[in-house]
Image (cartoon, rainbow, N blue to C red):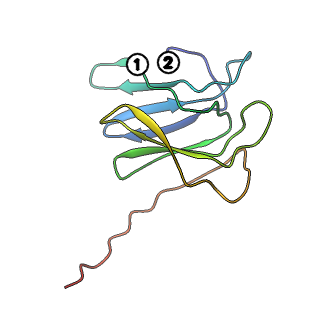
Amino acid sequence: MLSKRCRLGVAALNGKVYVAGGYDGNMFLRSVECYDPATDLWTRVSPMNVKRSRMALAASGGKLYAIGGYDGSSNLNTVECYDPEIDRWTFTASMCAHEGGVGVGVVAVNLPLRS
C-alpha cells in the first residue's frame, strides 16, 4: 500500500483489491487505494466523501460500498458508493442506526425471469 493504515475496509472488485479509509496512527482517513495484481502496482483513486475507520467495504454490482464506520468523533450511519468507471463516490441511503465496526457480506441472488 502507498499509505500505512489500520482499521480499514478491504474488498475485491473486477480483479483488483481496494483498501479504503482507516487510521494511520495520527489521523482518520478518507483515502482509497487500488492494487492491480496484473501490474503489481498500487494506485490512488478518488477519496471517499467522509473519513471512515472501522467501516465495512463491500463489492456488489460492479461498485464498492463503504458502510458505517467511525470518523474520529462519532459513529457513522452513512453509506457511500464508488463507481470505478467514473472514479467517483456518491452517498446512498443511510442506515437507520449509527454503527462503527460494521461487518457485511454479499450474497448473489439469481431471481427467475418473469415472462
Residue type pointed to by label 2: Met
**Around disc 2, counting alpha carbons within 10 Å, would you say few (fewer than 14), some (14 to 19), or many (20 or more)?**
few
| Residue matched to label 2 | 1
Q: Nearer the viewer, residue 83 or 109?
A: 83
Residue 58 coordinates in the image, percent (x, y): 49, 47
- Image disc number at residue 42: 1
Residue 106 coordinates in the image, percent (x, y): 47, 57
Q: Residue at x 50, y 14 (%)?
A: 2
Give the residue at the far bottom of this rendering.
Answer: 115
User: Sequence-wise, which precedes: disc 2 or disc 1?
Assistant: 2
Q: Secondary structure at mark 1?
A: strand
Q: Nearer the viewer, residue 107 or 72?
A: 72
Q: Is residue 62 above or below residue 21?
A: below
Q: Nearer the viewer, residue 58 or 28?
A: 28
Q: Is residue 108 above or below residue 22?
A: below
- Image disc number at residue 96: none
Residue 68 coordinates in the image, percent (x, y): 65, 46
Residue type pointed to by label 1: Trp
Residue 84: quarter of image: top left
In the picture provided, is 61 more to the left or to the right than 31?
left
Q: Secondary structure at mark 2?
A: loop
Q: Residue at x 49, y 18 (%)?
A: 1
Number of residue marks: 2
Residues at circles 2 and 1 in contact by the CB criterion of under 8 Å: yes
Residue 33 coordinates in the image, percent (x, y): 46, 24
Quadrant of image for the C terminus? bottom left
In the picture provided, is 3 more to the left or to the right than 98?
left
Q: Residue at x 39, y 45 (%)?
A: 63
Q: Residue at x 50, y 26 (%)?
A: 47
Rounded to the nearest angstrom, the CA distance separating label 2 from label 1 is 6 Å
